[in-house]
Amino acid sequence: MTQKISQSFKIDKIGMKKVGKGLLIGIGGLILTALVQLQPLIDLGNWNPIVITVCAAIVNFGRKFLMSYK
């Protein structure tokens, strides 16, 4: 199977998928960053580190899923 290479200033379907995946990963990172910034305002007691770790794992899972899904 050969891949098509997009010409300058044009984007093909493969390129659009890559841009979309990158956008979704970026949004996930943005949400995680916002949660970390809000951490002082949200008091979950001993659960704070666990919630942040779970959020990071969810974003990483989404990244892996999007990068392996074609």
Image: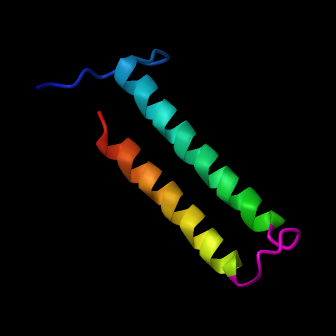
In this rendered view, identify the residue nearer to me: 33 or 44.
Answer: 44
- Relative vertical location of residue 32 with respect to residue 22 in this rendering, above or below: below
34 vs 57, left or right, is right
Residue 63 shown in magenta? no
- Relative vertical location of residue 26 with respect to residue 15 in this rendering, above or below: below
In this rendered view, identify the residue nearer to me: 65 or 16.
Answer: 65
Quadrant in which residue 55 is drawn:
bottom right
21 vs 6, left or right, is right
Quadrant in which residue 41 is drawn:
bottom right
Across and down, in percent, residue 34 comes to 76, 57
Residue at the image position 74 percent from the left and 67 percent from the top: 36
Across and down, in percent, residue 32 comes to 66, 58
Q: Main secondary structure of the magenta part?
A: loop
Residue at the image position 39 percent from the left and 17 percent from the top: 12
- Relative vertical location of residue 47 with respect to residue 59 in this rendering, above or below: below
Across and down, in percent, residue 24 comes to 54, 40
State which quarter of the image contains the C terminus. top left
- Relative vertical location of residue 57 with respect to residue 48 in this rendering, above or below: above
Quadrant in which residue 45 is drawn:
bottom right
State which quarter of the image contains the N terminus. top left
Residue at the image position 65 percent from the left and 79 percent from the top: 49
Give the image's coloring scheme: rainbow
**Magenta stretch in the rendered image:** 39-46
In this rendered view, identify the residue nearer to me: 25 or 39.
Answer: 39
